[in-house]
Amino acid sequence: MEDFPRDLIELEDRFSTEAACWDYLARLRWPEGFRCPRCGHGQAWSVRGVRKECAACHHQTSVIAGTVFQDTRKPLRQWFRAVWYVTSQKNGASALGLQRILGLKTYVTAWSWLHRLRRAMVRPGRDRLRGTVEIDETYLGGLEEGVAGRETEKKALIAVAAEEDGKGIGRIRLQHVEDASAFSLHSFVSASVEPGSVLHTDGWDSYNGLEFYGYKRKVTVQSRSKRKPHELMPRVHRVASLLKRWILGTHQGAVSHEHLGYYLDEFTFRFNRRTSGSRGKLFYRLLQQAVMTAPVRGSQLRKGVRPGPERRPRRRRR
Ligand SMILES: [Zn+2]
């Protein structure tokens, strides 16, 4: 379909009614056309816009049930504007900014909307990085950086992977890791990089042994080189400094450890699509992923719980 508004005027024109928003979400959710989840019939009619009723068995399905928009009491028009605001701006939005622009009554609502949308920024089953990939860790936290050594409590340790693309950067992956142990870093690498790729790392011991998982290694040892770290692994350092600027600038450093992972997801979502010519395409992608992403309860949202198969509520027994 790939059908999206090109600019704000088009957005306002196209999504001026709830029905238009419901219709757009329904097409994203059922790109091959609606299928009744109970009997598989392909014909349905809309009931009050919100629901589809199967023409054969009369089973009703909500367009937003099972998506991040489930149980919302706000108009979808407002949600669409939130998605537009988040995707159309180079640095995204802070909760305060979103609250102001949408005229939301509380900061908490704006905050929870942004976090719900962040849950949709990681595409399930996305491809891992490949080719030659720089890997390093960086500290994020407080407002200061550059503490010697690899252990710290108040700061968060972020593992960074960046594909080499000529002299530039391809795609990236970021993860908040517990420590710089082999266990943490090997888990990060195997989740983020396709085996067979070349890993470009420094001489930190924890990276040893990745060859056993099918990776090739290129090690640049700092002590043997007179160059500074940002010259040894320029891509990772560029990503890390952009990330810090974003966290400290757009979000003014007000990011807690338990929610940090979602901010990293948002940064990655935007970074990996930075060359996309159209902002409207990001709007489309995010809505498309939002209707494929399971809803999160408010309590889970506040605790920063990752939705996963093991945490989904059990089906009620009949
Ligand atoms: Zn049916």
Image (spheres, rainbow, N blue to C red):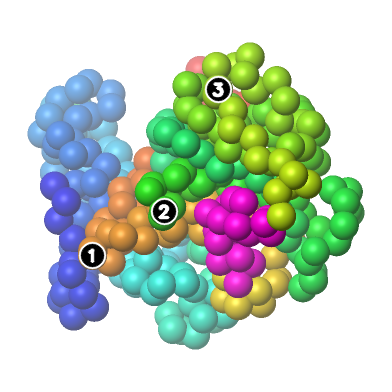
The percent coordinates of residue 69 (x first, y second) are 42, 53
Q: Which residue is mark 3?
A: 215
Which amino acid lies under the numbered mark 3 shown in the image of this protein? Tyr
Label 3: state its secondary structure.
Answer: loop
Magenta segment main secondary structure: helix
Does 169 appear above or below 135? below
Decide which of tag 3 and tag 2 comes sooner along the chain: 2
Q: Tag 2: Cα neighbours inside 10 Å, few (<14), some, or many (≥20)?
A: few
Decide which of tag 3 and tag 1 comes sooner along the chain: 3
Q: Is residue 249 left or right of residue 202?
A: left
Q: Nearer the viewer, residue 154 or 318?
A: 154
Figure quadrant of residue 7 = bottom left
Instruction: Single out the mark in the foreground, 3 or 2.
Output: 2
* Cα distance in 3D space between marks 3 and 1: 35 Å
Q: Which residue is mark 1?
A: 278
Q: Residue at x 49, y 77 (%)?
A: 98
Tell me where the magenta segment starts and ends, as one range: 227-245
Query: Badges 2 and 1: C-beta atoms under 8 Å apart?
Result: no
Q: Which residue is mark 2?
A: 167
* Number of numbered tags placed on the structure image: 3
